Image (cartoon, grey):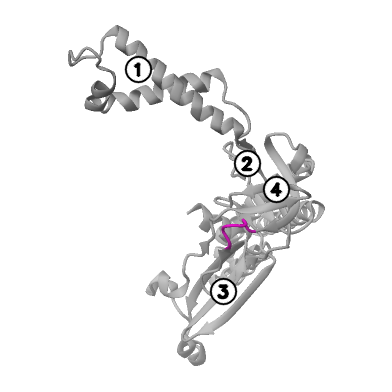
Amino acid sequence: MQQWLSWQWTRNGWMAFGLYLLLGIAGLKLGLPAFHHAILPAMLACGLIGWWLNYRRYRLIADTPTARAASAALGHVELYGVAANHDSAVNYSPYSGRRCVWYRCWRYHNDRQAIGSGRILDPLSLDSASLLSIPECSDQSFVLQDGKQTVIIHPEGAEVQSPHRESWQEGKETLVEEWIDEGDPLYVLGQLSSHGGIPPDQQTFRQDVGAKLSEWKQDQPALLRRFDLDGSGQISEQEWLLVRAAAEREVRQLHQQLASTPPTLHVRQPEDGKPFLINTLPPQRVASCYRWRAWLHALAALLSFLAWLHGGIAG
């Protein structure tokens, strides 16, 4: 659902202004009273919401300096590099089968008979699935390359602006694909974390030992076979010390393996609710796009308010 909402908002910023146009046309057809009491307030609300969403993203981008992946601090980060696939896991779009690092695709049915006859389709009388399919977004991770450093990008939940788009006809359907290609510039704003390379702390060690003991307790027959040395059918206090020592030994070996693994950097959707953005424009242009969208929405809200106010005074 979140991917669907993100697609609805970010697929093309200018489509939002088509909404204002449709509301204006609907208001003119309904008449001036309905235009003043319903359409103008709706346009004002859309303008204010659009301004806030875009301005919030603009300020977040403008206030977050672009970091080098090799020296970036863990946490909320802005990175810029080149898009690439994993060496052993290449991504392919499902419709065309093209090789890419990320895709978004959907299909919709053509009603050429209705278009040719001039008949206006009533969306309420049709199954929504026959008009437009929910976009299928790639959730497979890919790589941002920044010099010699690589960062694994997990795109689930991201607002993605893709540079490539293609549509074609297949029978009565139109298929649409958007994608990010290998070698495209890649801008990412999200939560940076590191896996491996650092031994877990004592608190994590204790938690993992407790989890291991709980796992063993769930299989009492196996626990007794392994540690019931006197055959009493119960684990004595002395035998429990052996159980705990064995759990600590297994967890310590696992942690040593993790510590010896080369660290990898990962970017995911922030847990604090901040936007997760993926784009192919330079950071300055990404910020500029959101800034212009914010002020255009603000202008639409202002004009709607002035028109509503003028209509109220005139009435």
In the shown orientation, is residue 195 left or right of residue 144? Answer: left
Q: Which mark is residue 176?
A: 3
Nearest to viewer (mark 2 / mark 4):
4
- Residue at mark 4: 150
- Identified at 53% across, 61% down, the residue is 137
Which amino acid does the dot numbered 1 rest on?
Val
Find the distance from the CA under tag 4 to the CA under tag 1: 41 Å
Q: Nearer the viewer, residue 24 or 11?
A: 11
Q: Nearer the viewer, residue 206 or 233?
A: 233
Callout 4 environment at 10 Å: few (<14), some (14 to 19), or many (20+)? many
Secondary structure, mark 2, is loop
Q: Which mark is residue 274?
A: 2
- Identified at 56% across, 33% down, the residue is 258
Label whose residue precedes the other's in the sequence (2 or 4): 4
Secondary structure, mark 1, is helix
Label whose residue precedes the other's in the sequence (2 or 3): 3
Callout 1 environment at 10 Å: few (<14), some (14 to 19), or many (20+)? some
Q: Which mark is residue 79?
A: none
Secondary structure, mark 3, is strand
Nearest to viewer (mark 4 / mark 1):
1
Q: Is residue 86 magenta?
A: yes
- Residue at mark 1: 243
Residue at the far right in the pictured view: 284
The answer to whether the residue labelled 1 contacts the one labelled 2, judged by CB atoms less than 8 Å apart, is no
Magenta range is: 85-90
Label whose residue precedes the other's in the sequence (1 or 3): 3
In the image, is residue 236 above or below residue 69?
Answer: above
